[in-house]
Amino acid sequence: MPDIELRHLTALAAVADEGSFGRAAARLGYTQSTVSQQIAALEKAAGGAVFDRPGGPRPVRITSLGALVLARGREVLAKAEEMTEAIERFQAGEGRIDIGTFQSVTNVILPVVVRRLHEEVPGCDIRLSEEEPENPRIGDLDLLFYDGRLDGDVESVHLLTEPYLLVARAGVFPDGPVPVRELHGAPMVAWPLTCDQPAMEQALARAGARPRIVFRTASNEALLSMVRAGMGSAVLPWLAVHGAGADEDDRLRVHELRPTPSPRRIHVHWPAGRSHSPLAIRTIQLAAEAAAELGARTP
C-alpha cells in the first residue's frame, strides 16, 4: 500500500515488542502521542485496527490484521536496514571499481594505490584490466590510465611527466648523457608503435637519429633482457626503467639523452559527466599522491 511508510512499520514493531505505546515511545525516542499518530495512520492505510487496546495497565494486543502487517513489515524493515547499511558502506568507499591500466602504471603506481585502498576499505572490489591498444576506449571502465590523448567525451587529471632515458648494456656508451645522433643506425629494441611510442621515435628522427629497430615487444622485461643480451639499446620512459629495476642493474647503464625527447605524460581518464563513487574519488587521490612521490624522484 503506498500510504504505509517505514515509520509506521517501525512504530508497529516497537509497540508489538514492548506491549505498550509508552514503552515503544521510549524505545524509539518519540513522544507517546507521536507513536499513537503513527499507528493511527497505519490503521487508516490498512483499513482496520492493528491493536486491541484494553486500557489501563494491561498490554495492548495485536490483531489478526496487525499480525499480518507486522510479519510483512518486519521483512520490509529488514530490507530497508540492509539498504541503509549498503549505502553507508558505499559512502565509506566500498563497492566495485573497474580500472584500465598499462604496464608502467600497473608495475609502479597501482600497487601503492591498491594496497592503500584495501587498508582503508577492506571490502572494496577492485577490478584491473591491462591493455595497450592504439586507440583505447573507456567503455564501461570507471577509470583509465593512459599516456596519450583519448577520443570521445572524457575528462582527465594529469599525474606524472617523465623523461625518456636510454638503457644500454654496460660499456656501450661512456657514462653521462648520450647525444641522440649517436643512436643513428644503432640496433635498438623498442615498444610496438602504439600509445606515445610513435611520437618518441619521431622526436629521435628530428634530432638526427633513426635507430635500426631489431625487436619490438610490449614487455619491459623482454626488452631489458634483450638489452642485457647485447641485441640493442632501448629508449624508455623513466617509470618503465624504474619499475623494471634497470637503474639498479650492474649489467645496464641508464643515460640521459641530449637533446631530451619530449617527456611522456600520464593521465587518469574517466567519462565526462559521470558522477564518481567515493571509491573512484579516493582512487584518483591516491594515484595522484603516488605519482607526486615518484615525480620528485625523476631525473
Image (cartoon, rainbow, N blue to C red):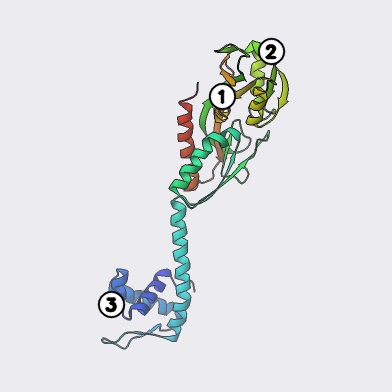
Residue depicted at x 31% and y 72%? 34
Residue depth check, mark 2 versus mark 1: number of the one nearer the observer: 1
Residue depth check, mark 2 versus mark 3: number of the one nearer the observer: 2
Q: Earlier in the sequence, mark 2 or mark 1?
A: 2
Q: Secondary structure at mark 3?
A: helix
- Front-most of residues 163 and 155: 163
When asked about the image quadrant of residue 5, the answer is bottom left
Marks 3 and 1, Cα distance to the nearest angstrom?
78 Å
**What is the three-letter code of the residue carrying label 3?**
Gly
**What is the three-letter code of the residue carrying label 1?**
Asp
Instruction: Give the number of the disc on residue 249.
Output: 1
Mark 1 and mark 2 in contact (Cβ < 8 Å)? no
When asked about the image quadrant of residue 163, the answer is top right
Near mark 2 (Cα within 10 A), the count class, few <14, some 14-19 or many ≥20, is some
- Front-most of residues 44 and 60: 60
When asked about the image quadrant of residue 43, the answer is bottom left
- Front-most of residues 134 and 41: 134
- Front-most of residues 33 and 206: 206
**In the displayed structure, would residue 271 be above or below residue 10?**
above
Residue 187, percent from left and from top = 70, 18
The residue under label 3 is 22
Marks 2 and 3, Cα distance to the nearest angstrom?
91 Å
